[in-house]
Amino acid sequence: MSSGGLKNRNAETLEDVNTVTKELKFLYNKRLLPIEKQYGFQHFHSPSFEDADFDNKPMVLVMGQYSTGKTTFIRYLLEQDFPGSRVGPEPTTDSFTAIMHGEVEELIPGNALSVDPKKPFRHLNSFGNTFLNRFQCALLPNQVLESISIIDTPGILTSAKRRMSRGYDFPAVLRWFAERVDRIILLFDAHKLEFSDELTRAFGALRGYEDKLRVVLNKADRVDSQQLMRVYGALMWSLGKVFRTPEILRVYIGSLWSQPRLLSDHCQLLELEELDLLADIRNLPRNAAVRKLNDLVKRARLVRAHAHIISHLKQEMPTVFCKESKKHNLIYELPLIFSKIQQQQRVPAGDFPDCAKMQERLMGQDFTKFKTLKPSLMASLDKLLSTDIAKLMPLLHQQDLRKASLPGIPDGTFFETGRSLKGDPFEQVTKSGESREIQNDEWVVTKDKQKYDEIFYNLCPNEGKLSGTKAKEWMVSTHLPNSVLGHIWRLSDVDCDGMLDDEEFALAIHLIEAKLEGHGLPGELPAHLVPPSKRLHKGLDV
């Protein structure tokens, strides 16, 4: 297919996504929001949606106990630091940090975020100043952040620190984010698998959103295969006790950072697991419209059950005497009321809220202000679920047919971007870009070129070039993750022929050494690193 045809298909698919999003926004404001306001849905469950909730990019919530590698994992995804980040063995992240795309690096405090209509965080002001002082947004120019946003969270306290108070409802904040994000990444440390009280409460906040949850057993290269098998089994057993669902949660095993892995007999397993996790994250922008539709349907079914509950309680209340005692009796009998509504109104049991939490929230409500069912509103809600959503399905089907051409996360580090390079031994793809003019004539790699040439010729090149297979055999000996080596390959194979000559191989070693010294890799090859013989190929001024 020509590049023009591919561009048109990308535009059509993105148009499908935008059309579905706009239609969902219209349906919510027309059919669902009036019922939420009529029956006070926001007082019992989550606040109403705003335009920013529909328009925002897919979000990834990263959580776990302290020192499990949350911030390091985010740096690994972005291939750079972000404002406000700090890594250490002690609890270093004490705030919720929304990491989003911006033209310049900037750190926005929580109180300012809570009044910004363009950001989907306005309803967080209900958690008070204590939380907002622990909430911030880091803006930075990054290709990954053009497609997703990432939420870094404070480390969950262990048993030894469980007496400490955060000053705000930590599980409630987690649940607020869980309802709105597209993916939840929960990290565990293979060295210290511990389920504290706060972690158990955090699991309770995630209940109902297990489909978004991905568990990662991190730092797995630090244990041998026998220990890994035991830790993995213990984790699966503990998760089964906490979530109590027939489905088994997906648990990835890895060592998710950009530093060399320790030698272990399960390195290949770690690489495969890493690729699966990164592919899952890469697909989030493609599935954003489906996720928003799914969340809207789930919310609509909960709103319907809520409206029937409120209406039933209103009908049971006396008009004059014994209102308070009747209220307490109705709250006590709420499980029976749920069953009665299920039978009379044919509302599925799975649509009802948690009974204990509903009882707790009803205690502070004035039942006399509740409203009875309004037939026109309920008919509008039924039309939403039975007809309006069904009309959107053809658009989603068209998106699925063209999903292969829908751009994912366009980061050269580990994500596909649409142009395959011939012979890439790490089976990755990248995005071509224009380089700037060279600032000086000297190639920075020249000073070590003789040393690199010795390695090159010891690998027995064929007609002056190393095949991808031979180059990979040497590159993997550095123990850098395959995703990082794949990015280095793409930067080094300047002429995109699937092989490396002596200059390209020298460039690859230079980038590997820079990475081993802790430096980040560029998204595209800077002009001063382009080998002299390739500068005409790249269209550079020499």
Image (spheres, rainbow, N blue to C red):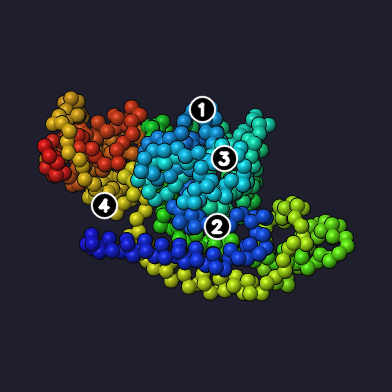
For residue 166, above or below residue 381: above
| Residue receiving disc 2 | 49
Q: Which mark is residue 132?
A: 3
Kindly report the distance in space between the C-alpha atoms of the residues bearing marks 1 and 4. Answer: 40 Å
Residue at the image position 86 percent from the left and 64 percent from the top: 320
Residue at the image position 60 percent from the left and 48 percent from the top: 175
Kindly report the distance in space between the C-alpha atoms of the residues bearing marks 3 and 4. Answer: 44 Å
Mark nearer the N terminus (3 vs 4): 3
Looking at the picture, which amino acid does disc 4 mark? Ser
Q: Which mark is residue 420?
A: 4
Nearest to the eye among marks 3 and 4: give it: 3
For residue 403, above or below residue 56: below
Looking at the picture, which amino acid does disc 3 mark? Leu
| Residue receiving disc 1 | 89
Nearest to the eye among marks 1 and 4: give it: 1
Quadrant location of the N terminus in the rendered image: bottom left
- Residue 289 placement (x, y as % from top left): 45, 60
Which quadrant holds residue 273? Answer: top left
Looking at the picture, which amino acid does disc 1 mark? Pro
Looking at the picture, which amino acid does disc 2 mark? Phe
- Residue 491 placement (x, y as % from top left): 25, 41
